[in-house]
Structures are given as C-alpha cells and as structure tokens.
Image (cartoon, grey):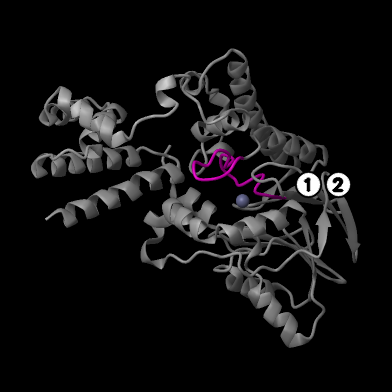
Amino acid sequence: MKMTEEHRKLLFGLYPPKSFANGKFHKISAFSNVGVVETSKGLVLFDISSKLNGPRVFKALREITDRPIKYIIYSHGHFDHCFGYLPFLEEIKGKGWEVPQVIAHENLVDRFKKYRMLDKYLNWLHDQQFGSVLGENKKYDSAKETLNPTILLHGNENYTFRLGEYTFELYHDKGETDDQIWMFVPEEKVLFTGDFIISVFPNVGNPYKVQRYPKDWAQALEKMIEKEPEHLIPGQGPLIEGKEKIKEILSITAEVLNFVHDEVVKRLNQGKWFEQIYHEMLEIFPEKFNHEILAQVYGCYRFAIHAVYRLYHGWYDTGNPTDLFPAKTSEIANEFLKICDVKQYYIRAKKLFGEGKLQLALHILDVIISATEKISSEILINAYKLKIKILQKKEQNEPSFIASNIYLNEVNKLKLKIINFK
Ligand SMILES: [Zn+2]
C-alpha cells in the first residue's frame, strides 16, 4: 500500500489541537504530538516538539490556556520531542515564572552527549533520510543547546508525582530508544505513549538509525494494556479514544513486534544467516497484521527483521568468507567487465527491467555504474538513465516513506551526474 494523504497528515502532524477528558487534557500536533494536562496548580507537558515546531506548539497552547508550565516530561531524546522549548523559556523569563521541572530517563543525558559528539554526522544523516523531501529548506535541530532534565529516572525505576487534582505515573521501558518514558494519568485513564505508538507500523529497524528494542517494546505495550486506558495520545497521529479500540491497537502492535522478534530468534537458533531469514520471513507475514495501525508507510516489516537480527548478531551476516574482507566494489565490477562486454550488461539489465525484475536489473546495472574502467559515455549515461527509471518505478510501489526517500535521493544524485557529465 502506497502512503496516502491521510498517512501524510498523520506522520507530519497536520491536525488541529484536540481537547478531551473534561477539557483538561489537550493534544497539540506539530509533526510529533505534545500532550498537555491542565491542573489547578499549572500545566504538565508530555514532550515539547522540535525547534522548528516549538513556536507552533507555543501558539496553540496559549490559545487554549494561559496557566504556567510546572513540568515537562521528555518521552525520549529524539529531536522532534525535546527541542521546541525556546518560546516557552522566553515566556517564563518575561513573566518571571519559576522554571519548570524537566523529567527524563538518565539515558537521555548520554543521548544528548552523543548528539553533540556526532553533530555534523547527524546533519549528514538527516540529509540522507529527509533530503529528497526537504530540498533547499534543510535545517536540522542541533543538541548544542538543550533544555536539560532536572529530575532523572534511573534504571528501571518508575516515578510518580501529583500536581493539583491529578497523579502522573511515569514508566521507563526500552523500545524505539533506550531512554523512553511513557505516562499514565489514572484519574482520567489517559495514556501518553510517545513513540511506542506512532499510528503506523513501529519505526523499528530504521536503516539509518542505531539499534532499537523490539521485544522490550512489545513488553512495554503489554504493560500499558494492563492500565486499561480510555484515551491515548500517541507520539504521532490523532488522539485514540475508547477502551476496546486502544486495547486492540496496543495488542496488535505488541503482537507484530513479538512475531518478528520470535520468528527471527527461532531461525537464528536454527543456524540460519540473514539472507535466508529475511526471505523466509517475507513469506510468512500474517494477514492479520495488515491492520490500519500497522500501515507500513514509515517503518516496515522488512526493516523490523533487520532490527531483530542486528540485536543479536555481529556484522558478518552472510556466512560466506568471501564477504569477510571484500575487495572494492569497483574492482569487482572491473573484473566482471573483463568477462564480457559492457554492452551485454546493459542489454541484460534492460531485459530484466522489461520483465519487471527490477531488483535483479539493479544488481546488473551496478556492474557498469560501479566500474572505474573507461566505459563509453553513451553506455554509462544510458545506465544512469535506466537506473533512474528503475528506482522511480520501485519508489512508486514503495509504501515506506524512508525507503522511498532512499530511492529518490539516488535518483537526484544520478540526475546530477548526467548533468555534470558533459
Ligand atoms: Zn522517536
């Protein structure tokens, strides 16, 4: 299923603010969601969005209530959840209010440190992941300046506090990251999941990102079910309401994570290598996971298989010693071109493309494109053009936004190569 307009709205937070539970709870969407609880003693915010979206969240919040913020809780240290604080700090300074308590898991402190160490790399990485969509408007958040936590959750400890008429129960579990917190307010049975739930397939196994934790993720969702929530503010997407509906969403998400995890583990125990595990797993995807809450428009099942494999496996993943210390791709391609004429590779790739064997066509074309031997410019440009066509075709049928962007990025690079060729 290709990403629909509805999915786009959902992923980019294009929803108006929503109030519920006696009008004291609010969800503000700005790419990711910000949860707001209004108490007689002030506000509790669950997440504070990105630097880019902070002003939008601030404006929306101040249209709802003018009460001061007493607590900010970071669901985890990702850029779209804790970097939008600037307009709030300005207001606090301007009004002479007390600076709010900021609560996070202790691993978030290390995450911010890591972000600072990898600042340039992360800009490059975000260019890869979002570059083809953002075009010239690229500007990413940096962790050089952060609003740091004042209260830390250590290890697996929980943290509960009261403000006004509500109790705020905070729990730590690993899932998308190792610094995640989810929150439950028992008086109104409101669950704040952060990115444990993003209204589509869990973003586990993102090809650009560090290790994620599918089994812990499933277990966290099972703990949330026990709370019998009646309202759910997800990390992204609209407010979810109704005990049964929420139970179904939490259960099916836990189930798919358990499924991928346990099936990969079973195959690791059978002594299988990645390629075999991956292709076998593609064959056994259960129909029931074609659920709207598991739409594979951002993360996807194929990525999730990688996530589990990588969690338990080293980088040597083929079982073929040829791949242990491989030669350069260009040298391998040069050797292939010595076996038969470059034209034959192009003809073969074109034939495979005609037969709809797009992936195989790419492998053959890459022999021409990766080679450093002198190749006639006509063939090389034709190879670039054919690769562009294949990638565009794959992109058209690709549900995952992340995979789509990987294809489109390469299309843009190849187009530039053609322009610069003359
Ligand atoms: Zn996240």
Task: Identify the main secondary structure in magenta.
Answer: loop
**Magenta span includes 400:** no
Percent x, y of residue 244? 73, 38
Disc 1 element:
strand
From this viewpoint, is residue 12 visible? yes
Q: Residue 279's spot in the image, x, y percent? A: 46, 21
Q: Give above or below for 76 relative to 138.
A: above
Q: In this rendering, is residue 106 above or below 309?
A: below
| Left or right of 240 in this view: 149 | right
Residue 18 location in percent, x, y?
Answer: 66, 61
**Residue 172: which numbered mark, if any?**
1
Discs 1, 2 touching: Cβ within 8 Å = yes
User: Which residues lie in the magenta part?
Assistant: 193-211
Q: Which quadrant of the rendered structure holds the C terminus? A: bottom left
Residue at mark 1 to residue at mark 2: CA–CA distance: 7 Å
The residue positioned 80% from the left and 71% from the top of the image is: 100
Examine the image and state in which quarter residue 72 appears.
bottom right
Residue 23, visible in the rendered structure: no
- In the figure, residue 143 lies in which quadrant? bottom right
Q: Dot 2 corresponds to which residue?
A: 157
Q: Residue at x 47, y 66 (%)?
A: 139
Does 53 sit above or below residue 121? below
